[in-house]
Image (cartoon, helix red, strand yellow):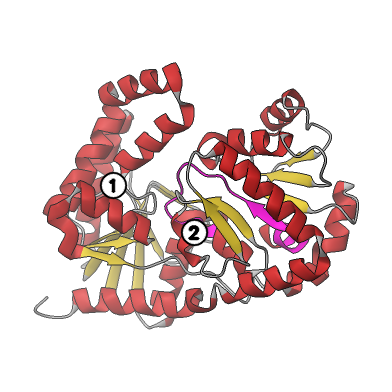
Amino acid sequence: MRVGLFIDHFDPGKGGLESALAHLAHALTDAGHEAFVYSLSAAENAPGRHRVISLAVSRRGELERALASKSLAAARADACDVTLAVRHCPDVDVYWPHGGSHAATLAAGEASKGGAAGAVSRLLHHVSPRHRVFLDLERAALSGGARKVWCVSQLVYDELAAAYPVCADRLEVHPNGVDRDAFNPRLRQMWRTSLREELAVPPDAPLLLFMGGNLRLKGWDMLRTALSRSPDLAWACVVAGADVATVERDARAAGIGERVIAIPRHDAATLYGGADLLVQPTYRDPCSLATLEALAAGVPVLTTTANGAADALVDPVAGQAVSVGGADAYACALRHWITTVADSDSRAASALAARRCTTDRDVRPWLTRMVSSLASLAAPGR
């Protein structure tokens, strides 16, 4: 079977959907199939056979449409049996939108701003040609263009079924998997002490971890407010992968500058090995890989119901999902969890419960199911 995989840029080292697509490409190759990747660029170490798509347009809207059509044409020329897109691309066999509904993403961005800023944002989104193209392509894929739509979480399934009822019978939930070998409780033995020494964190202070990226959508504003309400508790918080200057400025303004440690990119396994609690007060995350990695590593998670990976929290000892946008509730929950992980016995119990939450999320059966699903679509007569 030849499988065409469509993405904008392919650099698995960035994680997220690019890493997921790389896992799928490897799994296809290991199963004896051929994986062709069609993108504007690809890293040297990216798996699969690459086809770089050259375009003469530069405007984002035109580029999106042209990349979709040229990728499909190139896949046909390579005689691909089945096609899969993680980008906005109608007329594929499988549409795998890791970001979920684009409309829902825009709405979450507006909600995270609030007030006048939210009103301005709504206006700009309605007239933005770029967002209009994204929504048009999404509508084309979900209204009949794609034969199957893979949802990374039940949250994504529910929002797509509500927004596009016509596609309900083509939706499949494939919850994101996690490499439970790479992320495991042994990381704590390897990194807990050394990471604290590196960051100058007292050994008895619970270490909280916030994975940055999009600070606004990840809920940095809610987190810093919650942290500022617990000055009497011992804690330190690492903010990784975000704009360091912005985080440090915001932390100083909230009166917690001395306890917030902003760092650029850092090895995720090391951070999970040193952390006592992953804090994710997100306004929007279709299925947070960080949540699954932390749980697999034995790190409890405090997140929100806007995180599609929150359904992995099947044991209350492993973490909690607070209603999205509930600043007071999140601050209260954060105090509880800081106190919980400060106790060694409670911390150990949470680590065991967190690890158990990922028992059915291992990456290998996840990949096997998806390869089988693609093979069924490529079968003669389908």
| Element on which disc 1 rests | loop
Instruction: Give the quadrant of the N terminus.
Output: bottom left
- Give the image location of residue 109, x and y in percent: 42, 33
Q: Is residue 226 visible?
A: yes
Q: In the image, is 162 to the left or to the right of 306? A: left
The number of numbered discs placed on residues in the rendered structure image is 2
Does the image show residue 212? Answer: no
> Which quadrant of the view contains residue 250?
top right
Is residue 274 in the magenta section? yes
Say which label, 1 or 2, has the lower sequence index: 1
Reading the image, the residue beneath label 2 is 310
Task: Work out whether residue 327 or residue 75 is closer to the camera in this orientation and state it.
Answer: 327
Tell me the number on the disc at residue 88: 1
In this picture, is 111 found above or below 105?
above
The kind of secondary structure element at disc 2 is: helix
In the image, what residue type sits under mark 1?
His
Q: Is residue 5 magenta?
A: no
**How far across and down, in percent of the image, does residue 206 sit?**
80, 54
**What's the amino acid at mark 2?**
Ala
Residue 126 lies, with reference to residue 25, above or below; the image says: above
Q: Which residue: 29% across, 36% down? A: 63
Q: Quadrant of the C terminus?
A: bottom left
Q: CA distance from mark 1 to mark 2?
A: 25 Å
Quadrant hosting residue 136: top left
Residue 327 sits in which quadrant? top right
Q: Measured along the vertical axis of the image, is residue 30 above or below residue 81?
A: below
Taking the image as shown, residue 345 lies to the left or right of residue 25, namely right
Q: Position of residue 226 (x, y in %)?
A: 66, 38
**Residue at left 44%, top 20%?**
115
